[in-house]
């Protein structure tokens, strides 16, 4: 018996119980993944740290007819699945994007953008004045994503990544002022038209 489902996404703060799924995405995404304890530290102990996840919430189609009602009643409830995560540190007006990754099976659906936009929206709500990040010089997908949100390359760190001695670009997005917020809101509007997601980041972390 097959049941058709569509997917809705939800952005929320990361919890300690999310860490095994996050660590798996990290392992699939980076040559030098973070240790699980680094996530525990960021969530529990680092007051400057803001860790978020995007999760997929399977939706059953609306009931239509007896057969469909039966299917809905007997289908096991699907648990939300974490499909991406991100983090930033907010220190004295600087929002430093520390990490961002989407599960390989879920890339190219706008979820990296949902994560970055979520972090920027939170940064601005918390009065960040500018944002910074480092990115591998060869990472075209990430570079494009950051450019889309107006980050600019301001420097290059030689041999920054220890696994292959690759350089990092240092990127800045400044200022996060009213004019940027207006352009950001336009981008967010078109993102929301493209990607079905809810945003719980305005609620306090559990
Ligand atoms: C970078 C990453 C987070 C992007 O996530 P994603 O969900 O695939 O990206 P989205 O679908 O939201 O795309 C957003 C934008 O990113 C850029 N982008 C994404 N995939 C791309 C690709 N394959 N080629 C070129 N640009 C791409 C585009 O600008 C895109 O905007 P568009 O849809 O208007 O063209 C994802 O590729 C990833 O997890 N990579 C591994 C981890 C990583 O490198 N993180 C960055 C560390 S600095």
Image (cartoon, rainbow, N blue to C red):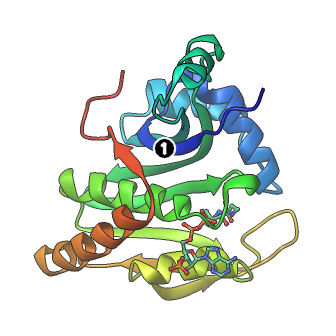
> Is residue 176 at least partly visible in the picture?
no
Residue at the far left in the pictured view: 178
| Residue 186 location, quadrant | bottom left
- Identity of the residue drawn at 27% across and 29% down: 204
Q: Quadrant of the C terminus?
A: top left
- Image coordinates for residue 81, horizontal then vertical, percent: 62, 33
Foreground pick, 76 / 111: 76
- Identity of the residue drawn at 53% across and 55% down: 98
Q: Quadrant of the N terminus?
A: top right
- Image coordinates for residue 194, horizontal then vertical, percent: 43, 66
Please say if 60 is above or below 91.
Answer: above
Please say if 121 is above or below 198.
Answer: below
Foreground pick, 197 / 201: 197
Asked whether mark 1 lies closer than 8 Å to ligand 1, one says no
| Residue 47 location, quadrant | top left
- Identity of the residue drawn at 61% across and 85% down: 156
- Look at the numbered disc 1 and give the secondary structure of its residue: strand
> Is residue 167 at least partly visible in the picture?
yes
List the residue tagged with mark 1.
8
Which quadrant does ligand 1 occupy?
bottom right
């Amino acid at each position: 018996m097959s049941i058709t489902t569509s997917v809705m996404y939800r952005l929320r703060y990361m919890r300690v119980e999310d860490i095994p799924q996050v660590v798996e995405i990290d392992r699939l995404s980076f040559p030098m993944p973070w240790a699980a304890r680094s996530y525990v530290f960021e969530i529990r102990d680092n007051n400057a740290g803001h860790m978020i996840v995007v999760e997929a919430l399977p939706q059953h189609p609306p009931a239509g007819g007896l057969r469909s009602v039966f299917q809905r009643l007997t289908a096991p409830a699907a648990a939300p699945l974490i499909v991406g995560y991100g983090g930033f540190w907010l220190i004295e007006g600087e929002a430093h994007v520390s990490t961002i990754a989407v599960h390989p099976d879920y890339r190219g659906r706008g979820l990296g953008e949902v994560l970055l936009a979520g972090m920027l929206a939170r940064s601005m709500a918390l009065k960040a004045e500018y944002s910074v990040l480092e990115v591998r010089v060869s990472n075209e997908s990430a570079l494009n994503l950051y450019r889309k949100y107006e980050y600019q390359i301001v420097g290059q760190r030689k041999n920054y990544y220890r696994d292959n001695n690759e350089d990092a670009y240092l990127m800045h997005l400044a200022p996060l002022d009213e004019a940027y917020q207006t352009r950001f809101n336009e981008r967010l509007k078109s993102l929301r038209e493209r990607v079905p997601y809810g945003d719980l980041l305005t609620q306090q972390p559990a």
